[in-house]
Image (cartoon, grey):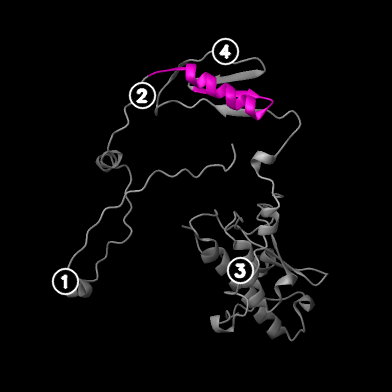
Amino acid sequence: MNEPVDTAGARRLTQRVHFERDGTVTVATGKVELGQGITTAFLQIAADELGLPLERIRILPASTAYSPDEGFTAGSLSIQDGGKALRKTCAELRALLAKSGKKSYWDLTGFDIPGEGPEKPAADYRVVGTNAMRVDLPAKIAGRPAYIQDITLPGMLHARMLRPPRPFAKLLSVPDPPPGVELVRDGSFGAVLAAREEDAIEAAKKLRAKAQWSDGPAIPRDIHRWLKANVTESNVAKEKVDAAAKARSVKGLQAEYHKPFLCHASIGP
């Protein structure tokens, strides 16, 4: 889903790992902590490859201002892609330290990248695979993280959209909103604005019940059969057949799988 992450060159290494003056290490990744625990996993990977204790390493929250570009955070690819890139980066730094003859990473200056940093074998890992404490959980349990629905700005208004009852239906008419609520309309798009979120929710509910919509195309009762009959894009995962394996086969299996629509949308209103 993503292109392989390039870790070549000093800029790439220093973009990911910083050795601070206070003796700690700051690690930047391009993946976002959404509650899946990748911050702790990245800490473990860096600790093992650098040979440093967990408490000396800190993971920076992902930001387009300084993080390496690792694409989107989805598809359970954070460890596969971001973790692999971090592991390779730390292995390069460990090889650089060994080649330089310096006593610590903090003594490295003006270095060239050796490009020969072998990753530690899994048997040598002492942190990865252990039950390390999730560093993201204390703040979540205490309710400290701020999500989009927690943000308050001066003069901020809350909005709710008037969604159609069926796809492609056109908004014909909508009554006036209650006092203190503003109606925004652009063609078939309708939304309400209010100073308080609960007022916007209640107004949208009332206007939605009284709004007049045109008839849209009927939704097929068998949506999966309809989709197969109206294919717009196809993707072949694997087509090559192993002739030797096929010759040894006793029974052939054929199956068809359906899944519901997924909406990768904002976690806040």
Dots 4, 1 in contact, CB < 8 A? no
State the residue position of label 2. 216
| Residue 259: percent from left, percent from top | 36, 48
State the residue position of label 4. 176
Q: Earlier in the sequence, mark 4 or mark 1?
A: 4
Where's the C terminus, which quadrant?
top right
Query: Of residues 198 and 114, which is closer to you in this image?
Result: 198
Quote the CA–CA distance across marks 4 and 3. Answer: 56 Å
Dots 2, 4 in contact, CB < 8 A? no
The answer to whether residue 16 shows anywhere in this view is: yes
Residue shown at 74% from the left, 34% from the top: 153
Q: Label 4 neighbourhood size at 10 Å, few (<14), some (14-19), many (20+)?
A: few
Mark 3 element type: helix
Q: Amino acid at mark 4?
A: Asp
Quote the CA–CA distance across marks 3 and 2. Answer: 50 Å
State which region is magenta: 189-214
Quote the CA–CA distance across marks 1 and 3. Answer: 45 Å
State the residue position of label 1. 250
| Residue 87: percent from left, percent from top | 59, 72
Q: Earlier in the sequence, mark 1 or mark 3?
A: 3
Q: Amino acid at mark 1?
A: Val
Q: Earlier in the sequence, mark 4 or mark 3?
A: 3
**Quadrant in which residue 226 is drawn:** top left
Magenta stretch holds residue 100? no
State the residue position of label 3. 86
| Residue 52: percent from left, percent from top | 71, 77
Q: Amino acid at mark 3?
A: Leu
Dots 1, 2 in contact, CB < 8 A? no
Dots 1, 3 in contact, CB < 8 A? no
Q: Label 2 neighbourhood size at 10 Å, few (<14), some (14-19), many (20+)?
A: few
